[in-house]
Amino acid sequence: MWRYFAPAAGFLALVALFAFALMRIGSGKLDIREIKSPLIGRPAPAFVLPSLTDPSRQVDSRAFAGKPYLFNVWGTWCAECRAEHSALLAIARSGGVPVIGLDWKDEHEEAVAYLATLGNPYAEVAADNVGRTAIDWGVYGAPETFLVSAEGIVLEKHIGALSMAVWQQKFAPHLKSGGGS
Amino acid sequence: MSRWLTLLALALVTTAALAIDTEAAFPDAARQARYDRWIHELRCVQCQNAAIADSPVGLASDLRRQVREMIAAGQTDDQIKAFMTERYGDFVLYDPPLTARTYVLWAAPVVLVLLTVGLAARVIVRRSRAPIDSDPEEPA
């Protein structure tokens, strides 16, 4: 008897598995494009890059040591970066952590105009015109946001547009436990 | 015949025109071969289903430049591999290593083949033992 039902049961099991995965993708719980960052739990990559707002100055990542910070990779060519901009401004205004920007492979004038129009949430913006620092951070698509601890360890990474909900769920808990360490 | 040859030649020319880097990265064949092997071995993590050799996106060209610079600087294959996986994880390699996280990936084809062969053998043995014309599954 079982031999008649086994194929049907196998088929239904596969349907259930696919439906489960598709529903998780649909609800945003599962992102099949997301690559788990090997950087989490490891020291944040160091960089020295020209400042976007004042190209005569250098932004040195060593200056961020001692307190946690948010590291946000963006570009004016990136549509989702516009979507997350209001969340970045709100996070910066709340004063919990400074937001450091990495302007990735962008046009200088356009980037300056973008911040002038939409508001500047960044305590510092480093301009990565060649994309070398982005490689060090394992960036593969803007926007990407990292939380770095006071000790300079990468605690969390979010790929895609940031929102206050993502901030509350993924990032804020790290800061509550043990003052950002 | 010559018409076909012309068509063939044209087809070859058009695929060459689609290549991303038309100039060689290195003057010597040995380093060029290593470069070609590496850019086909590394996945474009942005588009995810192409090697960096075949992808026109900015990140792929940045990673090709990185490979070129590392080979030019005399780095070994292990150093290039470590550099890439430290930043992008094993996903960046088209030939992922066998680890605790990837053993399912490597074992699944073997298990499936063994399962299929086992099932087929069972059916064949049973069918060949059953007397002809008295298979209980067949209507008499």
Image (cartoon, grey):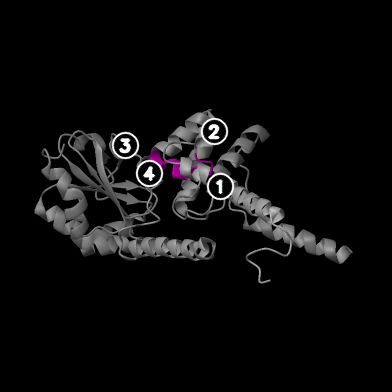
Q: Position of residue A105 (x, y in %)?
A: 38, 52
Are circles 3 and 2 on residues that touch, CB within 8 Å?
no
Q: Is residue A123 visible?
A: no
State the extent of the magenta-drawn residues as a range.
Answer: B87-96
Q: Which residue is mark 2?
A: B71
Q: Which mark is residue A138?
A: 4
Q: Residue type at mark 3?
A: Pro
Residue A27 seen from this side: yes
- B62 inside magenta stretch: no
Residue B66 left/right relative to A131 = right
Viewer-closest of B93 and B99: B99
Q: Is residue B88 magenta?
A: yes
Q: Residue at x 43, y 61 (%)?
A: A13
- Label 1, on which residue? B109
Subunit bearing disc 4: A
User: Marks 1 and 3, how far apart in space?
Assistant: 38 Å
- Name the front one of labels 2 and 1: 1
> Is disc 4 placed on a helix, strand or loop?
loop
Q: Earlier in the sequence, mark 3 or mark 4?
A: 3
Could you tell me if the residues under marks 2 and 1 are in contact, i.e. CB atoms within 8 Å?
Answer: no
Pointer 1 and pointer 3: residues touching (CB < 8 Å)? no
Q: CA distance from mark 2 to mark 4?
A: 20 Å
**Secondary structure category for the residue under label 2:** helix
User: Where does the image place residue B77, in percent across and percent down from the top left?
Assistant: 53, 31
